[in-house]
Every structure is written in C-alpha cells, then in structure tokens.
Image (tube, grey):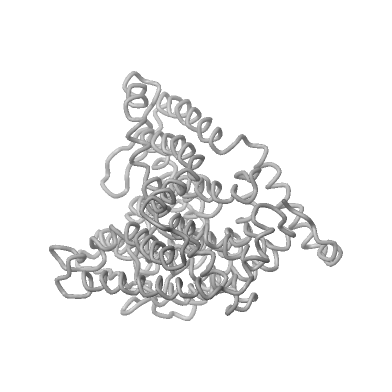
Amino acid sequence: MRETRPEEASATTGKLTLLEKSLAAIEELGNKLPDPLTLFFILSLLVIVVSAIAASVGLSVVHPGNGKAIAAVSLLTPDGIRKIFTQAVKNFVEFPPLGTVLVAMLGVGVAEATGLLAALLREVVMITPRRLIAPTVIFAGVMANVASDAGYVVLVPLGAVIFLAFGRHPLAGLAAAFAGVAGGFSANLLISSLDPLLAGLTQTAAQLIKPEYQVNATANYYFMAVSTFLITLIGWFICEKIVEPRLGVYTGVGASEVDMQMEEVSVRERKGLRWAGYAFLAFIAFILVLLIPPQGILRDPEKFTIIPSPFIEGIVFIIALAFLIPGIVYGKVAGTIQNDKDVAKALGNSMSGMGYYIALAFFAAQFISYFAWSNLGIIVAVKGADFLKATGITGAPLLILFILISVLIDMFVGSASAKWAIMAPIFVPMFMLLGYSPELVQAAYRIGDSTTNIITPLMPYFPIVVAFGQKYDRNLGIGTLISLMLPYSIAFLIAWSVLFMIWFVLGLPLGPGAAMRI
C-alpha cells in the first residue's frame, strides 16, 4: 500500500527522522494489538474484571454536581452478569453511532452508486487548485460540527475519496477530515448544538457562587470562530508536511481509477449534475420552509428555537435525503439508473459494505456500556479533577494544567457534556473565587476536550474511522490511525493553548458580553 519516496528520505532532517521513528514505533506497537473487533471484546472482559476489583476495594468518589457518592460497580455479581446477557441487544441497537452511520450511508450509497459523487468530484478536481484541497477538507470538517455527529459519517470517508480523486493518498484525506471534525470539534463559525449544552452546565455551576449568573450559548463565540482558522491552518501544515509525506505513494484500491476521475465530465453527466443541483436546491428550500418561519414545523414545538429543535435531532435523516434525492435524480438523467429496482439495489449495496462496521459496533457498544455501568469513567474523571484542585496552582499555569487534565479525562470519557457535567461544578466555582469568569473556564475545557478525540479509541466514532480506512488499507489498525492522528493532536493542543494564553493575557472578550474576569 505504501511506498517511501527516495527524495523525501534523503531530504528528511534529523529532527524529522526522530519524529518519523516515533510515529513508526507507535504504529508498529498499536498494530500489534488484535483486530479492533477482537480488541473491544478483550477490553470488555477487562472492564468486567477491573470493575470487580474496584468494587471489592470500595473505590468511590463524590459527584461534585449533586453531592452523591458514586461507587465502582462490579459486573461479576449475579445482577451484573444478568445485565450483561439481557442488555446486549439493547446496547447494540442503542449504540449512538450505529443509527447515525447506517442512515447517512443509505443516502451516500445511492449518490455513489448512481455516479453522482464521482462526477461531482471530477468537476471539483477541475476547478479547485490541488494545493488547497487539504485546508478545504479540514475547514469543512470543522464546520461540519454544526450538524452534530454527521461529519464523522459523511465528511471523513468523503475526505479520502476527494484526496484519491486528486491522485493523493486517501488515508491522508481521511485523516485531514477526521482532524477537522473531531480535533476541531469545539471550533466553528456558527453556533452548534454543543454551545447551549455546555453553556447550560456552566451556568448551573456558576450559580453555586452567584445565583443570578447567566451564561449564553454565544459565550465562547469570538474565541471559537478565530480557532476555526487556527485549526485549519495548523491542520493544513500537519497534513502536507508530516502525515502525507509519511504515507508515501498510494498504490492500493482505487489508485488505478485516478486517471479516469481526472477526465472531463461528459455532456450527459454535466446535465445530470445540473438537475441533481436543482433537486438539491428544491430540497433545501423545502427544509427552510419548515425551519425559517417563527413557528416553523422543524423548530422546537414549545419555544420555537432552532437549537435545540427537531431540525437538529433529525439532521442525520435530512443529510441522508440530501444525498438520496439528488442521487436518484442524477441517475435518471445520466442514465445510470432505470427504475426503482436499481435504487433498491444501490441501497442494499450501501449496507452490505458496512458489514464489518456493524460487527465492530456490536463489541464497541458492549465495551462502552460496561464502562458506564461500572462507573469507572466517572471515577477517573472525578479523581483527575480532585488532583488538579489539590495542586494549589493558580492563574495561567492552573489554566494550562486544567487543559491537560481535560485531555487526560477525554481518554476515558468520550462525551463532552458528560465530562463537563462532572468538572464544571468543581472548576467553575473555583476559578470564580479567583476572579476568573465561567466563560473562560468553559473555553479552556473545550480545548482539552477537542484535541484528544482523534487519538482515543474510546471515542465512539473512532472504530468507524478505522473501518473507513480499511477500505484503502485492509491491514489498517488502531495503531496506524493513532500514528496518523497524533501529530494533529499534539499540534492542535499546543497551538490552541498558545492562542488561549494570548487571548488571556490580552484580556480579549471570549464572546458577546463574555469577559475574562468577573
């Protein structure tokens, strides 16, 4: 799959050689692990054993939010064993990424089978400078977070396809998109569903000190908007200077199709693209009719807000239709589909290609459920928070240490809101007593939470990215993906923390009406 370019090997500096050796060692070590499916099975067994040990020694913490004691729960008790057997199907069916992936892939599968995506990519290749593809994919990944988790299942595989269409390594495109979607999770030029969620938790924690304190959903908007461009630029550098050169020349699946993909779009294909565009615009207009009016059907039925709303909750289905409808229209006009049987076949083929992921999701769902049942994740989070509080460090060094603790906790607890529900009641009041605003603490937390997403297998969508990557390298394992993403993670953490410190020293507002100090 991979070849080293001689000119790159000779031009590599000593420092880069050390980096290459380190990443290669991480990849080799990681890939010595079993197949991801087997690994999640082993980890599930490990959690069961560790939960029993933790419970036997009485490991527990006090939840900082509600003051209730949280003890480790053994899964080797009769109740625990019964739960493992009776909840297995429920764990699988209710695994959050499962439905998101399969529903989105229905629409994407039809758009791919009819030739819409291939024609569209060839058109894009003709008009987009090759040099700007990487930052475009990363920026799109960051912006995709406004659609919640849909970016993982739409943009990440699309990033690989786009790079391949340009004759570049598809795993570099996959990594670039993953870096934008997950590594830049908190950054955006728009307000996403995460903003009001975190703001609500921050406000509740702040009111422990000042009952009247209000935290708006736009509390970190200025900082996160600037961060969008920072993540794009840093990601661009990492992609082209470290990740893609290390991957070398791609000679695997689909490489022989690059020349075909670079051919001019035919008259019939261009007509299909035009009508697919009309269908897409008509669909968007339909959604806007349901969303824009003050009492629109897709707004919250009580408060008539857009965030949260049925629109946000149904964004995955909306995205699936946004691919499905233009895909069918393109196929009819371009002649790649003749009737409903062709569409049904395309839908079936899109699901058949997800077989490995579905099997992987079953074991990942069990592991994540066991981890939650045992309370081990919450215990690790609270212990980490207690450690930071006990250091006695204040000011800027405390903020940096707080970011690092957030990074560590993110390795064990994937949900941004779940971590913040634990950490906010401790750190928001503590920093407020030191004169720092809740909005400042929330911004620092978001840096640590985002930058580690791309290197932790406990992040629910991590197995999905592994499965997508195996389309281009069937030997790709967790070690390969971590070694690809680690340069992004480290660079994002350092650059984002530096930007945060500059913002802090200059005392710039984090968002409308959100100052650094109180």
Which residue is found at the position 35% from the left and 32% from the top?
89
Q: Is residue 31 left or right of residue 314?
A: right
Q: Position of residue 138 (x, y in %)?
A: 54, 68
The residue shown at (25%, 71%) is: 286
* Whole-percent x, y for residue 502 in the image: 52, 76
Observer-nearest residue: 219 or 207? 219
217 displayed left or right of 247 = left
* Image location of residue 333, percent across then percent down: 42, 68
**Nearest the eye: 212 or 197:** 197
Please give the name of the residue rendered at 23% of the width and 60% of the height, measured from the top-left corner: 310
Q: Residue furthest top?
A: 78
Instruction: Say whether residue 19 is left or right of residue 210.
Output: right
| Quadrant containing the C terminus in the rendered view | bottom left
Q: Position of residue 195 (x, y in %)?
A: 33, 65
Circle count? 0
In this view of the protein, can residue 516 be seen by the observer?
A: no
Query: Residue drawn at (33%, 52%), measured in percent from left and top?
Result: 421
Q: Is residue 85 visible?
A: yes
